[in-house]
Image: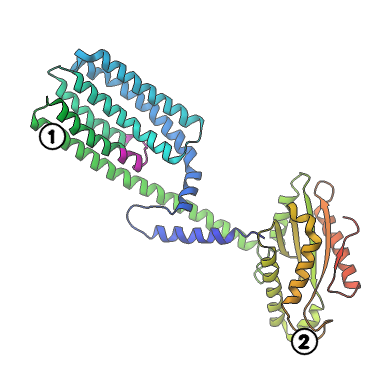
């Protein structure tokens, strides 16, 4: 029986520890994967819209080509169109398909860098006396991309660092910028890049904290709901949990299902001999052993009554229902719990097994068939497994 509560509980503990931290948040791999699964698709849509808006505002920069670098306006326009095409293509890809996080961040880092590269290429090619002023677009582009576009901090950092390396290289290669102007251009880029990246880190940290608060609330609600569906003594599902599991199995499809109903033999006598606290220990031990034996299988184990348990099997294990019941019978005996009033001197259980297909037999009818088989096991001397004649 697979219990999702344990990994969810571990995740809840990780979230509590992360929320107690200060500074930038880095998720462990499992939480990062969940964060991406929960937010990645919506984030791609948001980025696509940002790229479209960036293309519109980027088109306004063509005015700078006419005002500051008119001698190379044809080349500048061609480069401009290539960058716009890249922006539109990226927006289209993000809208139509799910992109892996690393690929998405590399692509989004490339967009502002391409804009900056176009600006620097136009500056390098132009012989206009106003070309030096074209460099003002570099810190402007970095600041705009880092503050107005919702690019993740990692992608923005890559683009900003690449720009900070490219600018001095272009200035050195062209050699046409006075040193004071070159120094101020690099200083302006450094200040804009550093401050906007800091702001992005703060925004991303708060976004991640908000996500963790929301996820923590969902996990707490799920844990509370799961606890309400669990028998407090044995850890198996209670009637509410069993009803929820049955609704999921009887969903209108034709699903093979098996029911194993088992009852502790002479349990009233056990309570009379050893007391109710010992009876609770007995129930708890049998529930734990049954859950351990059924672990990893498509099985729902529930406490069906006072000393009765019910296992609902689906999937390939349905064909092995009788063998599973026999394993459970031996497991109960294997606990070697003394019972002076029982045959053999130890606690045992009797089992009834019934199989059906959900579109042909309802839940109640299947349980009735298993109960009839259990009655035959009791009548035959207890500590036996019996199959239902029909379900």
State the image coordinates of residue 327 (x, y, percent, origin top left): 76, 67
Residue 231 inside the magenta-drawn segment: no
User: Crowding near pointer 1: few (<14 within 10 Å), some, many (20+)?
Assistant: few
| Quarter-of-image position of residue 309 | bottom right
Identify the residue at the far front of this view: 173
| Quarter-of-image position of residue 161 | top left
Above/below status of 169 relative to 379: above
State the image coordinates of residue 205 (x, y, percent, origin top left): 36, 49
Please report whichever mark, 1 or 2, sits nearer to the chain's N-terminal start.
Answer: 1
Distance from the alpha carbon under mark 1 to that under mark 2: 92 Å
Q: Quadrant of the N terminus?
A: bottom right
Please state if 293 lies on the left or on the right of 189 as rendered. Answer: right
What residue do we see at 38% from left, 25% from top? Answer: 86
Q: Quadrant of the C terminus?
A: bottom right
Residue 156 inside the magenta-drawn segment: yes
Mark 1 or 2: the one toward you: 1
Give the residue at mark 2.
273
Q: Please identify the dominant SS of the magenta region.
A: helix
What residue do we see at 40% from left, 51% from top? Answer: 209
Please state if 386 lies on the left or on the right of 179 as rendered. Answer: right
Please state if 269 lies on the left or on the right of 105 as rendered. Answer: right
State the image coordinates of residue 148 (x, y, percent, origin top left): 32, 34
Give the residue at mark 1.
184
Residue 165 visible in this rendered orientation of the protein: yes
> How many numbered markers are drawn?
2
What residue do we see at 35% from left, 27% from top? Answer: 54
Please state if 223 lies on the left or on the right of 287 as rendered. Answer: left
State the image coordinates of residue 275 (x, y, percent, origin top left): 73, 85
| Range shown magenta | 148-158
Q: Secondary structure at mark 2?
A: helix
Viewer-closest of 343 and 205? 343
């Amino acid at each position: 029986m697979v219990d999702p509560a344990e990994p969810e509980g571990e995740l809840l503990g990780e979230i509590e520890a992360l929320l107690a931290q200060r500074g930038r948040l880095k998720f462990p791999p499992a939480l990062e994967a969940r964060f991406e699964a929960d937010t990645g698709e919506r984030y791609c849509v948001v980025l696509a819209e940002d790229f479209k808006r960036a293309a519109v505002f980027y088109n306004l920069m063509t005015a700078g080509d006419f005002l500051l670098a008119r001698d190379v306006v044809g080349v500048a326009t061609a480069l401009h169109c290539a960058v716009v095409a890249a922006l539109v293509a990226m927006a289209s890809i993000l809208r139509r398909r799910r992109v892996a996080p690393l690929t998405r961040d590399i692509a989004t880092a490339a967009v502002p860098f391409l804009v900056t590269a176009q600006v620097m290429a136009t500056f390098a090619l132009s012989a206009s006396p106003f070309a030096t002023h074209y460099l003002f677009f570099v810190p402007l582009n970095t600041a705009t991309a880092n503050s107005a576009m919702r690019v993740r901090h990692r992608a923005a950092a890559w683009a900003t660092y690449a720009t900070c390396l490219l600018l001095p290289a272009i200035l050195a290669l062209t050699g046409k910028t006075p040193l004071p102007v070159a120094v101020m251009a690099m200083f302006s880029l450094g200040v804009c890049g550093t401050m906007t990246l800091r702001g992005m880190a703060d925004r991303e940290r708060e976004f991640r904290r908000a996500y963790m608060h929301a996820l923590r609330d969902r996990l707490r609600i799920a844990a509370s709901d799961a606890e309400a569906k669990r028998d407090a003594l044995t850890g198996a599902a209670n009637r509410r949990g069993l009803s929820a599991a049955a609704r999921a199995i009887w969903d209108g499809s034709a699903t093979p299902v098996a029911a194993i109903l088992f009852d502790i033999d002479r349990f009233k006598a056990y309570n009379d001999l050893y007391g109710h606290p010992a009876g609770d220990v007995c129930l708890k031990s049998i529930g734990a052993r049954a859950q351990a034996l059924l672990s990893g299988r498509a099985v729902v184990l529930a406490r069906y009554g006072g000393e009765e348990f019910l296992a609902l099997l689906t999937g390939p294990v349905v064909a092995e229902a009788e063998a599973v019941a026999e394993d459970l019978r031996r497991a109960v005996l294997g606990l070697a719990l003394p019972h002076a009033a029982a045959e053999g001197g130890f606690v045992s259980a009797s089992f009834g097994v019934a199989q059906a297909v959900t579109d042909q037999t309802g839940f109640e009818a299947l349980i009735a068939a298993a109960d009839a088989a259990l009655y035959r096991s009791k009548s035959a001397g207890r500590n036996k497994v019996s199959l239902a004649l029909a379900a």
